[in-house]
Image (cartoon, rainbow, N blue to C red):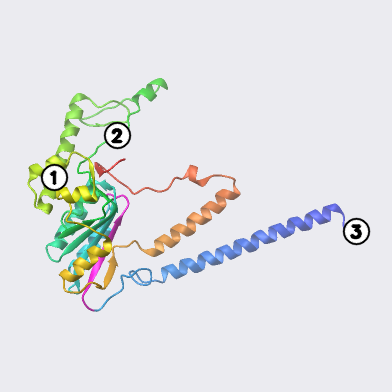
Amino acid sequence: MEPDADDVMGRALLKRRLWRWRAGAVIAVAVAVLFAASSSVPPGKGWSSAGKIVGPHLVRLDVRGMIGSDVSRWTKALDRAGRDSAVKGLVLAIDSPGGAVTGGEELHDAVEHFAQMKPVVATMGGMGASAGYMIAVPATRIFAERSTLTGSIGVLMEAPEFSGLLGRLGVNVQELVSGPLKGQPSLTKPVTPEGRVMLQGVVNDLFDQFVTMVANGRHMPVEKVRQLADGRPYTGRQALAAGLIDEVGSARDAQVWLGKKVGLGDSPKIVRIGEAPKSFVVRHHILGWLGNVVMSWLGLDVSGIAPQLQVPIDGAVSIWKP
């Protein structure tokens, strides 16, 4: 007896549902296994080279991308390494356009504190500009590639202002403030002349602090630093001629220099510090993948709905913007 069309369609539908349940079960098991594996790894072991090394060695701190307002992971790692008698020096590897002034200052101070105890070599990759340069200046020696973009010594404060758009939409914002300079800059009204003077004073003071850091770190007169600090970036070769770096060379050259300086030769043992916990990265990728699967099933473009997360930055910034 031939099965009718309804039976055939029903069986096909049942098979599809069974396949989806099986696929879901497999995914759930895989996620559980990965979560358990990542949670069972002790901090600093297995996921990075931050395990204990017996004997003298160097540490390496990588600062890549935007420097956020919270740099405590890096500053704590520098503090621990500075107090470790087996650590003989620091390789500070930078590839950053800068970021938050506060984060840059905190990291600068942590590097400076470390450099007062042990030698530091800074090596810059594609970019070490603005706050990315700020954190390098306490180093004993600074290396950069010929094509590295560095310098860009300056401070930027900007805020969007939508009063024109709100007016066209017929939206009025009523604001009560405790003083004429409170609430400036504002999203809903232009900066007043008095507010502009006040904000420029804040920027100028932060800039003066930056200039002082460079002058102290590079042993350079303040007036010479001010001549160089008009916001422009410099290539590695230009920075060398201006005295902003010490040598054109690679990260390997910087490591060899530091190894020889501290008596560990040209192939010193190096331990990476300050790395983000890998378990977080695993969870992030898993959740991101599952999110993409769900959004695909719904026929939606996740990139348009949830753009890539940015490093949190508060307040004024010291960043090179092409």
Q: Which of 184 and 155 is in front in this view?
A: 155
Magenta-drawn stretch contains 82: no
The span from disc 3 to disc 1 (Cα, nearest Å) is 88 Å
Asked where in the image residue 315 lies, by quadrant, the reply is top left
Measure how far apart labels 1 and 2 are at the Cα level: 24 Å
Disc 2 packing (10 Å; few <14; some 14–19; many ≥20): few
Specify which label sits upstream in the sequence, 1 or 2.
2
For badge 1, the amino acid type reads: Val
What residue is disc 3 on? 2
Q: Percent x, y for residue 150? A: 24, 48
| Mark 3 vs 2: CB contact within 8 A | no
Q: Quarter-wise, where is residue 112 in the image?
A: bottom left
Q: Residue at x 17, y 29 (%)?
A: 197
User: Residue at label 1?
Assistant: 211
Q: Label 3 is placed on what type of residue? A: Glu
| Mark 2: secondary structure | loop
Residue at position x 34%, y 49% in the image? 311
Provide residue 162's location: percent of width, then percent of height: 35, 28
Q: What stretch is highlighted in magenta?
A: 55-69
Image quarter hosting the C terminus: top left
How far apart marks 3 and 2 lie (CA) works out to 73 Å
First of labels 3, 2 by sequence position: 3
Task: Check disc 1 and report its element: helix, strand or loop.
Answer: helix
Q: Mark 2 points at which residue?
A: 159
Badges 1 and 2: C-beta atoms under 8 Å apart?
no
Whether residue 273 is visible, yes or no, is yes
